[in-house]
Image (tube, rainbow, N blue to C red):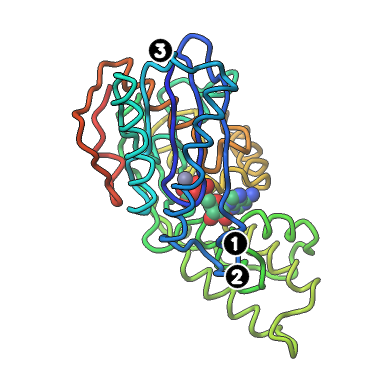
Amino acid sequence: MRVLGIETSCDETGVAVYDSEKSLLGHELYSQVALHAEYGGVVPELASRDHIRKLIPLVEDILQKTDSKGAIDAVAYTSGPGLIGALLVGSCVGRSLAYAWGVPAIGVHHMEGHLLAPQLEDNPPAFPFVALLVSGGHTQLVEVKGIGHYRMLGESLDDAAGEAFDKAAKMMDLDYPGGPHIARLAKKGVPGRFKFPRPMTDRPGLDFSFSGLKTYTLNTVTKHALDDGLPDDQTCADIAHAFQEAVVDTLVIKCRRALQECEMDTLIIAGGVSANNRLRERLEQALTKINCGVFYARHEFCTDNGAMIAFAGCQRLLAGEKENLSVDVLPRWPLDTLGSL
Ligand code: KG4
Ligand code: ZN
């Protein structure tokens, strides 16, 4: 089965063609980062309008590059969670193409897409496993026994990990999205100059909270600010380092705890923050010690992309899932309400 995948839930327009026999044939991404840069975050209406401009040319391009014109068996698109206008663009285009081609269409849960992205790599993780989903909107630990067999173990009570990176970056006048900027700056930081709190690690449970860490970061920035409102470059690097260590440490502690609670030996990490090299390195070190393995996707499939949507949709269609012709999007959609395969 050959599936066209469409992702438009936020500020990336992603398309891909996945073939269940030949694997991923190709993918393309257009990032709106530059468009939103001057606002310091995603402006929903601008995002929707830009998806309208970019989506169809990208689809035409990927069909040509993968030699898939007339060969698509189904269309998968992100139907939630995400920005409602942005979701509507992908779902309307996806459903219309499917109708015109006389093939089925399926709406995919964005976080299930992330969760399954490591399956696109060589040597994919086998079920069951624990998944750490860390994106701009979600921080969740999930017990995964198969596709759609999801049990929520814990999640953030306030800010998501990616959101915390973005806000910390903004405090130091770094561009959106802040994660990669903080990671780059942190490399120049002096370890140990600042020690930031590891929220909610001193009590049992698998939930997260990053808002206190955000306030701690703001207070540190303010305390060291010079006349222009910012600390000097080295102090910013030291703050970025301490902030990243605190987030990574917190995530590592909770992942180890989740694996022990579920008596599992495999962790997958997915979502934008799973592109963070320090997180990968620290998880590898910590999990090797307890004979557990960690899997993740290549960097471009950690952040939003069409390949994960094509893959997730393909699995559900192969299992016989069908949808009617209505265009439904779900800006809020709990992952553990999905049907299992
Ligand atoms: O999964 P994603 O592309 O979009 C959502 O579904 O939200 O995740 C975007 C988030 C942003 O908050 C961004 O700052 C963060 O992922 N991110 C990173 C890195 N790359 C992206 N955070 C930390 N380190 C990175 N290298
Ligand atoms: Zn995402």
The percent position of residue 248, horizontal first and vertical second, equals: 59, 52
Residue found 30% across the figure and 29% down from its top: 106
Secondary structure of the residue carrying tag 2 is helix
Real-space Cα distance between discs 2 and 3? 44 Å
Could you tell whether 265 is left or right of 283 in the image? left
The percent position of residue 135, horizontal first and vertical second, equals: 49, 49
Q: Vertical placement of 151 versus 166: above or below? A: above
Which residue position holds label 2?
Answer: 170
Which residue position holds label 1?
Answer: 176
Mark 3 CB in 8 Å range of ligand 2? no
Residue 303, image quadrant: top right
Real-space Cα distance between discs 2 and 1? 7 Å
Residue 33, image quadrant: bottom right
Q: On residue 1, which mark appears?
A: 3
Q: Are marks 2 and 1 in contact (CB under 8 Å)?
A: yes
Q: Earlier in the sequence, mark 2 or mark 3?
A: 3
Q: Are marks 3 and 1 in contact (CB under 8 Å)?
A: no
Mark 1 CB in 8 Å range of ligand 1? yes
Could you tell whether 27 is left or right of 93 in the image? right
Neighbourhood count class around disc 3 (C-alpha, 10 Å): few under 14, some 14–19, many 20 upward: some
